[in-house]
Structures are given as structure tokens and as C-alpha cells.
Amino acid sequence: MASKTPRDKTVATRVPQSKPPAIVAELGRPETPEETAARKAENSRKHRANQTLRNLLWSLAASVALMLLIVIVVVRPDQPPREAVDFAEVAAQAQPTIDEPLAVPAVPPQWTSNNADLGRSSDGISTWYIGFITPSDEFIALSQGIDANPTWLVTLLEQNLATGTETIEGREWTVYDDRDGEDPGNLAYAMVAESGDSTYVLYGTADDNEFRTMAATVGAEIDSAETDATEAG
């Protein structure tokens, strides 16, 4: 049997044809390399600009959110008015612990007390204190120093100097007017009177009329204490 001669099989290789450049509708022809590079550069610029705008908007939104958070956390609704202190009751409880009568001024009903306390100063002087808020929303305090020494008064008034005297309801008060001073605080005005073993100091930010009202009521307390002392003697 004759052997078959193998056929020579030649495999044809297809050479891919290069794709013709795309026609750009606006130009009606393919882009030149320069135009292609310019188009890509412009697209890249627009992308960066859009990215910058998005980042700016996100930063703005974050800042607004932070501001709202601060407002929510920091800003509080107006607190309810602090309940007035019954200074007469505080005095009644403290009186048995000390011999000197504690002044309980009969202030007008529009006045309120925000604090009352019998304590000791840094140099050991027993001090009866009442803080008042006046109808004009100003402040007056009464400090009654018992067996007080000159240092106690100088310290309380922060070394302010006397500027005059005023007589109210027959009682003379020494006046310390520092309203024109630089940041006088609660020592803008003060009045001082002495009787028995007590030194009475009125000080605060109220006007003259409110100080006179306070001095008259405290003066009535001093008169009563002096009468009781005379009768007891």
C-alpha cells in the first residue's frame, strides 16, 4: 500500500488593520494630535475644577454643621430666675450661735435676696452677709462685721478711701464713692456705720435712692439693737 505524502498546510495570519481616526462632529474631520492633546488637557482642567468645587462645598457643609453643634451645646435657653433666699429665716437660725443681734432689714417687697450667710472672714471676724437685687436689677450687699477691726473694713472695701458722709434718718454714714473708678465692680458705692460691737457696710452698684432706702432700713435695725441693749443694761 502506497504511503500518503503529507500535505503542507500553510496557516494564513490575519494582519489587523489600523482603525481610521474618528471623525469629530464639530470639526467634520479627525482631530490632529495637537487638538487631541488640547482636548484632554481641557477635560483634565474641568475635572480638577469640579473636584475643587466639591471639596469646597463639603468643607462649607462641615463648617455649618460644626457651628450648629456649637450653638446647640453652648447656647442654653434662659435659666429660670433663682429662687429668693429667706434671709430672715437664715438669720433666725444663725442668731443662737452669736451674741450680737443680726440685722434683718425690712426692705420693700420688690427687693429680693440672692444670698444670706453667717460666716468668718480670713482674719476670723464673724460676718453676717445678705445680698440683695433691687427693683432696678442692681446689687446691694449688707456685711455686718462683729467685733471687726480696721483691717476687716479695709480688706472688704479693697482699700477704697472715704469720699464724704451722709446722714439718713438721723444716722451718719461714711460714704465711699468709687463709681468713676476703673472697673469698680460691686464696690462702686459703699456706706459704713458703726454701733456697739458691729460695723455695718452697705456696698454695690445701685443708685443713690436705693442706697438711701437700704441705709434707712438697716438704720432702723441698728436703732432697735441699741434700744434693746439700753433696756438690758
Image (cartoon, helix red, strand yellow):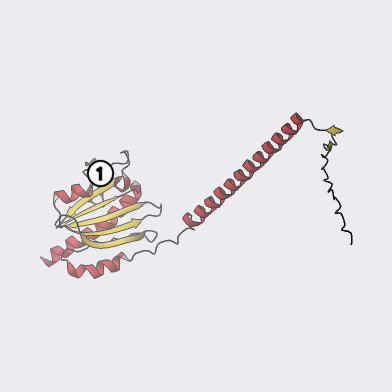
Residue drawn at point x = 19 percent, y = 49 percent? 153
Q: Is residue 25 left or right of residue 84?
A: right
Which amino acid, mark 1? Tyr
Query: Residue 144: horizontal and vertical position, in percent?
Result: 21, 57
Q: Is residue 131 left or right of residue 52?
A: left
Answer whether residue 106 is visible to the viewer in this image: no
For this rendering, which residue is in front, 104 or 1? 1
For this rendering, which residue is in front, 224 or 117? 117
Query: Residue 201: horizontal and vertical position, in percent?
Result: 23, 52
Query: Residue 1: horizontal and vertical position, in percent?
Result: 89, 62
Q: Is residue 18 above or below residue 215?
A: above
- Residue identifier under label 1: 176
Judge the density around disc 1: few (<14), some (14-19), many (≥20) Cα neighbours within 10 Å.
many
Residue drawn at point x = 31 percent, y = 61 percent? 115
Please tell me in which quadrant of the rendered image residue 164 appears. top left
Q: Is residue 121 left or right of residue 29?
A: left
Query: Residue 114: horizontal and vertical position, in percent?
Result: 34, 60
Q: Work out which residue is located at the far right of the displayed protein and give it.
A: 1
